[in-house]
Image (cartoon, coloured by chain):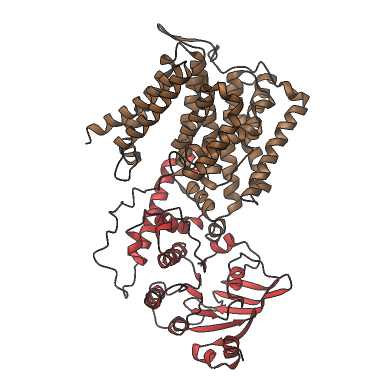
Amino acid sequence: MLDGLSPLQPTPLLSAEDLTIRFGGLTAVDGVSLRLEGGELVAIIGPNGSGKTTLFNILNGIYRPHAGRILLKGEDVTGLPADQIARRGVGRTFQISRLFLDLSVLDNVLLGRVGTNRLAWLAPLLRPKQAAEELADHAARAYALLEEWAPDLAARCYRPARELTLVERRRLEICRALASDPDLLLLDEPSAGMDARETRELMEEIRRLRVRRPEIGIALIEHDMSVVRGLADRVVVLNYGRKIAEGTFDEVAASREVREAYLGT
Amino acid sequence: MSLTAPFRILALEVVILGLTVAFLLTERLMLSALWLGVGILAAVGASRWTAGEDGTPWALLATHRGWAVGGLVVLLLAVPLLLRSSPYWLFVLVLAGVHALMAVGLNVQVGSADMVNLGFAGFTAIGAYTSAILSRGLGLSPWLSLWIGGLAAAAVGVAVGLPAARTRGYSFSLVTIAFGIIVYLSLINLPAVGGPSGLGSIPPFSIGGTSLRSALSVADLHLPPQAGSYYLVLGLLALAVTSALRLHRSVPGLVWNALREDEIATKVLGVDVVRAKLWAMGLGTFFGGIAGAFYAHTVGFIAPDNFTFLHSVMLVSMVILGGADNVAGVLLGAVVLTIIPEKFRAFQDYRLLLYGVVLVVMLHLRPQGLLPRVVRTYASVPRRPEGARRPEPVAADTVAVR
């Protein structure tokens, strides 16, 4: 039940402090802090190469930061590998979608569901019937999720993901991330390569997601300012790996440093 | 339709098996080649004949699984009768069974998870030598040492996997090649296990004091001495195929497929990829170890030369020719690549060339193999006609009840 505005939780969903990572001599992310509450949508913007995707890669454990701390629901998860972080409720999509292209649409979503479960490797041999029933149950739920979020993809659930268009792939990847029931969703440029109409549809879907799963916190990397303006509660601006501004869209848009970063001097 | 479907399946099986036996029994090389051609045409024709909407016989076979499996079992059991006059070819079929057992295990790695293990012969050697030494030296029953051989191979598989699972692609293959060569050289240089001349007088499997290597005669039927081994390898194969299919059709198989497609994406979904690879190593090499042990007790003699790099390449060729990640395809690949070189022994100097040509041609023309993998379907999710849309899209403001 939605009972108005939820009060600020004592422990935020995500609290990243002073994250720093260097590749050789380049400091790709430099002392960036980020807080995110459940139900909040934070957009991360910045010119190409400003460290947005690298920040995501640190947050979900693909990279280990050289300095800084990541707290998820109060638990220190700094340095944990990506699979451990996924199991703690972080789902993500990639800028260039990383679907399992030769597997069916349904299997992609199904993997989103089973990945975070405890895998019983010998169950199919020791308890074949039970294992089969469990998988069938997961499949039915994965299908229900597809029907809810992408009925057009549900209709093609047994087709290989390779047959999908770029836009459909992106939507399927979001479905796959949702299938794991994440608390925190990291969306890396979901609108890349979409035309104006497709972008509007995507925004509609994200709004719908926030209505139906009001507890999910979303961090969104985005270049399309109409999407940022339309969706974000808060905007974080990165430039050369540093956070140069944070606030509402209007506040950030008014910042001189942000304009310089985007337009040059 | 439903009346004729079982008939069609049985006819398909009879044609394929009949032609195989005819091929085996033909002495003249040219005639064998002719049979081979006829056989291929007949197999293609028959599978077209039984094909469903998607162009493959799988759907039909799945709906009439009882008929398909039952028919196949009866036919396979009858093969030793047909081959009474040529025990040599029955022995070749036993070898095909051993290779199939190995290939089914290797397929878990190469086919499902794209871990191209090029040292698989080394793991089968562990199984063979373990079982041989336990039964020969300690007097353990081969029925027991067989499984210990499998477990030993699995343990070594996991141990090799610990460093190897952190690599992928060519690096993984290189690690496994190195392992295969280490095993081969160790066997040659360890006098305790027979050195280059190998281990002989390995006890056979026996039932109630009767060796499975002795001739079987039930009532008036006299079967060649190889029949016992043939039936035993069929039994082991049935066990391995059932296990492999169950793994394939459940979460582990799905996770291995995900690894094959994209390791990072798999990790990001919460899968411990190193552990997933270790299970693929352990389970795959377990079958390999059992196959090696079975071979040791069946032939009674093993030597390092039974477990060379060439054997590893042959096993990978079988998986790729037959159809990676399709258990039926892998069986086909193992049988074809065992029988054909044996039939055309006159060209045996060119055997390695054959494997090379098979690999290159298949990877170029039909990378999915003779029998491509099939899309998993779930009883809980009905197959719907292409493009069928839901009549009413969900309204945007409906809040889902969970």
Locate residue B105: give its quadrant.
top right
Q: Tell me, yes or no, if residue B271 can be seen here.
A: yes
Indicate the position of residue A129 as horizontal and vertical percent values: 41, 42
Quarter of the image containing the C terminus of chain B?
A: bottom left
Of all chains in the rendering, the one displayed in red is A
Of all chains in the rendering, the one displayed in brown is B
Indicate the position of residue B399 as horizontal and vertical percent values: 33, 72
Above or below, A29 relative to B87? below
Indicate the position of residue B310 as horizontal and vertical percent values: 63, 32
Quarter of the image containing the N terminus of chain B?
A: top left
Above or below, A70 relative to B357? below
Above or below, A42 relative to B12? below
Q: Outermost residue, top direction?
A: B220
Residue in view at x 37 percent, y 53 percent? A158
| In-front residue for pair A131/B258 | B258
Above or below, B11 relative to A140? above
Indicate the position of residue A104 as horizontal and vertical percent values: 41, 54
Residue in view at x 66 percent, y 41 percent? B176
Q: Is residue B286 left or right of residue B365?
A: right
Q: Tell me, yes or no, if residue B105 can be seen here.
A: no
Q: Is residue B291 left or right of residue B308?
A: left
| In-front residue for pair B137/A255 | A255
